[in-house]
Every structure is written in C-alpha cells, then in structure tokens.
C-alpha cells in the first residue's frame, strides 16, 4: 500500500490522505474546489468543477495514473439542476475514455462547496 501526497493539490483537511494505491489501483479521496494553497474557489459551478478536475489531475499524476486510466468516478453535487453544466465540463476531461460513473445530489458538502468528486484508477 502506498499513500499518495502531492503539494499540487490541496492537503487533506482531516484524518485522511489524498489517495492510496493498493495492488496497482489508485483510490482518491474526494476532491473539492480548493486550490493547492487551500483557498476555496467561490466561483460558479463551472469554476468549481474545473478546480476539482485540476486537483484530481494532480493526485492522479502523483499516483502514476491519469484520466485515461480512471475506471470509476463518483460525483457528489448539491444541486441536480447544475448537472448539465457539470456533465459538459466532465466531458471535456473524459471525452474519448469514458469510465463508469455515479452522480448523486447531496444536501451538504465540506466547506459548503457545490461539487466533490472521487475516482478509482489503474496505475500505469
């Protein structure tokens, strides 16, 4: 088992790691729209979603994985009415390769953000 940690994504804000690799499979913790410096992106759902993908890209890279090796994504959103916007941005990152995905509306997320995402990916 390998703990994944990079300064290119926000540090964990609790007793957990950014991700873990077990048997060549990477499991990310949920990423929210925080910058690597820990600043919250207070912009609209587009800006928040792009920041989440930036964070995921950083932890995937550190793990030796990439968006092309993601096998499952789980998306948590506060407002299902924003799903089409999130889905459009999601498609920018997963255009050719389309992993399995779940998307659920939740009542609240850490720091009251609008989106959180976690992924499972194969390590190259």
Image (cartoon, rainbow, N blue to C red):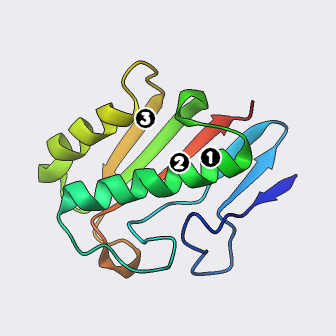
SS category of the residue bearing label 1: helix
Coordinates of residue 51 in the picture (x, y in percent): 37, 59
Coordinates of residue 22 in the picture (x, y in percent): 82, 45
Residue 70 seen in the figure = yes
Coordinates of residue 32 in the picture (x, y in percent): 42, 65
- Label 1–label 2 contact, CB within 8 A: yes
Residue 116 seen in the figure = no
Task: Work out which quarter of the rendered image holds the C terminus and state it.
Answer: top right
Residue extending farthest to the top is: 96
SS category of the residue bearing label 2: helix
SS category of the residue bearing label 3: strand
Image quadrant assignment for residue 101:
top left
Give the labeled residue for mark 2: 57
Give the labeled residue for mark 3: 101
In this rendered view, identify the residue nearer to me: 27 or 60: 60
Are there few (<14), some (14-19), or many (20+) residues within 10 Å of tag 2?
some
């Amino acid at each position: 088992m390998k703990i994944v940690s990079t300064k290119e994504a926000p540090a964990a804000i609790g007793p957990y790691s950014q991700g873990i690799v077990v048997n060549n499979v990477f499991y990310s913790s949920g990423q929210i729209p925080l910058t690597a410096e820990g600043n919250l992106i207070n912009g609209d759902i587009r800006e928040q979603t792009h920041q989440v993908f930036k964070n995921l890209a950083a932890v995937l890279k550190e793990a030796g994985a990439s968006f092309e090796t993601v096998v499952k994504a789980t998306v948590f959103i506060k407002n299902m009415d924003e799903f089409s916007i999130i889905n459009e941005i999601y498609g920018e990152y997963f255009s050719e390769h389309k992993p399995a995905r779940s998307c659920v509306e939740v009542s609240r997320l850490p720091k009251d953000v609008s989106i959180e995402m976690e992924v499972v990916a194969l390590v190259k």
